[in-house]
């Protein structure tokens, strides 16, 4: 299975733009970035907790 190419990504971006609108895209990107940061912190914290217990 290969990764999507340039044109596939442009089509997906266009659909997202139509669904959410240009004004909400920065907010949506910021929310997704914050969710990834919190997820990484949670995973890092849980692995540190596992090492302390063991």
Image: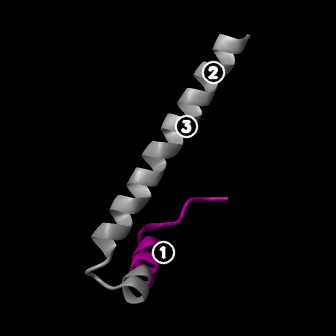
The residue tagged 2 is: 49
Residue at 62 percent across and 24 percent down: it is 47
Q: Which residues are magenta?
A: 1-15
The residue tagged 1 is: 8
Residue at 43 percent across and 59 percent down: it is 32
* Neighbour tally class for label 1: few under 14, some 14-19, many 20 plus, Cα within 10 Å: few
Q: Nearer the viewer, mark 3 or mark 1?
A: 3
Identify the secondary structure beneath mark 1: helix
Identify the secondary structure beneath mark 3: helix
Q: Is residue 15 above or below residue 47?
A: below
Q: Are marks 3 and 1 in contact (CB under 8 Å)?
A: no
User: Separation of disc 2 and disc 1 at Cα?
Assistant: 41 Å
Q: State whether the magenta stretch is mostly helix, strand or loop.
A: helix
User: Separation of disc 3 and disc 2 at Cα?
Assistant: 10 Å
Q: Position of residue 14 (x, y in %)?
A: 39, 83
Q: Are marks 3 and 2 in contact (CB under 8 Å)?
A: no
Q: Earlier in the sequence, mark 3 or mark 2?
A: 3
Residue at 47 percent across and 49 percent down: it is 36
Magenta stretch encompasses residue 7: yes
Which quarter of the rendered picture does the N terminus lie within? bottom right
Q: Earlier in the sequence, mark 3 or mark 1?
A: 1
* Neighbour tally class for label 2: few under 14, some 14-19, many 20 plus, Cα within 10 Å: few
Side of 50 relative to 29 (left or right)? right
The residue tagged 3 is: 42
């Amino acid at each position: 299975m290969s990764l999507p190419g340039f044109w596939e990504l442009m089509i997906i971006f266009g659909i997202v733009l139509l669904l959410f609108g240009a004004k909400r895209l920065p907010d949506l990107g910021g929310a997704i970035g914050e969710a990834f940061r919190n997820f990484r912190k949670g995973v890092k914290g849980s692995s540190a907790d596992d090492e302390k217990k063991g």
